Amino acid sequence: MASVLIALGGNVGDVRATFTKAIANICGMTQAALTARSSDYRTPPWGDEQQEPFINACIEIETGLDPHALLFTLHKIEKKFGRDRAQERHWGPRTLDLDILAYDDVQLNKPELTLPHPRLFERAFVLVPLAEIVPDRLIAGQTPHQALARLSADGIERLPDLQ
C-alpha cells in the first residue's frame, strides 16, 4: 500500500459537501483507507484572480493503486462532480479539483503526471492544509512546514468544522 497525499479544491456550488462526497468516492473507487483529513480553508483565487474564493483541503490515503490508475480514477471523480477539463478556463472556476501531491517517495516526470506535484511548494493554499496533517513528512527533500515558512499565507482562513 502506498501513502498518497491529495489536494482538494473548488469554488463552484457547495464545495464542502462536494468534498465529503468526493472523499467517500476516492476511498470507495480506489479501495483506499483515509488516514488523515485536513480542515477546510477559504483561500483567495490563484492565477485567475477574477473569481470567487476557493475552498481547499488535503487528505492522506493508503491505496494499492499505482499512480497512473489513481490519477485516472481521480479524473473520473472530478467529472462525476461536474468538472469538464476540456471546457474550463486555465485556473478558472471549478466544482472539484483533485491533485496528487505525493505518492510515497515516488519521483515521476511524465507528460500526464509529475510526482511530487511540480508546484506544490509554491502554493500556500495547498501547503496550509497539508502542513496541518503531515507537517514533517519529507517530500522532495523538504517538509510542508519548511516550505510554508517561505510563503505568505495571507487571506487563507480555516473554516469551522462541519457539524
Image: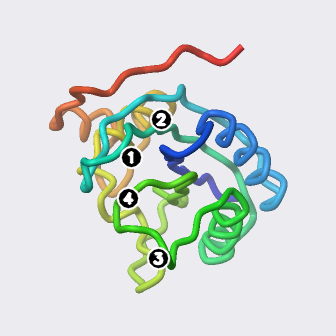
**Residue 44 x, y percent position in the rendering:** 30, 37
Q: CA distance from mark 3 to mark 2?
A: 22 Å
**Residue 147 x, y percent position in the rendering:** 24, 41
Q: CA distance from mark 1 to mark 4?
A: 30 Å
Q: Nearer the viewer, mark 3 or mark 2?
A: 3
Q: What residue is disc 4 on?
A: 92
Residue 28 - label: none
Q: CA distance from mark 4 to mark 3?
A: 20 Å
Q: What residue is disc 2 on?
A: 134
First-in-chain label (1 vs 3): 3
Callout 1 amino acid = Leu
Query: Between 141 and 117, which is closer to the camera in this rendering?
Result: 117
First-in-chain label (3 vs 2): 3
**6 up-or-down from 110: above or below:** above
Residue 113 - label: 3
Q: What residue is disc 1 on?
A: 138
Q: CA distance from mark 1 to mark 2?
A: 9 Å
**Residue 118 occupies which quadrant of the picture?**
bottom left
User: Secondary structure beneath disc 1?
Assistant: loop
User: Secondary structure beneath disc 4?
Assistant: loop
Q: Nearer the viewer, mark 1 or mark 4?
A: 4
The answer to the question of whether label 4 and label 2 lie on touching residues, with beta carbons closer than 8 A, is no
First-in-chain label (4 vs 2): 4
Which residue is found at the position 33% from the left and 57% from the top? 140
Which residue is found at the position 59% from the left and 63% from the top? 83
User: Secondary structure beneath disc 3?
Assistant: strand
Callout 2 amino acid = Val
**Residue 20 x, y percent position in the rendering:** 71, 37
User: Secondary structure beneath disc 2?
Assistant: loop
Mark 2 crowdedness (10 Å alpha carbons): few <14, some 14-19, many ≥20: many
Callout 3 amino acid = Leu
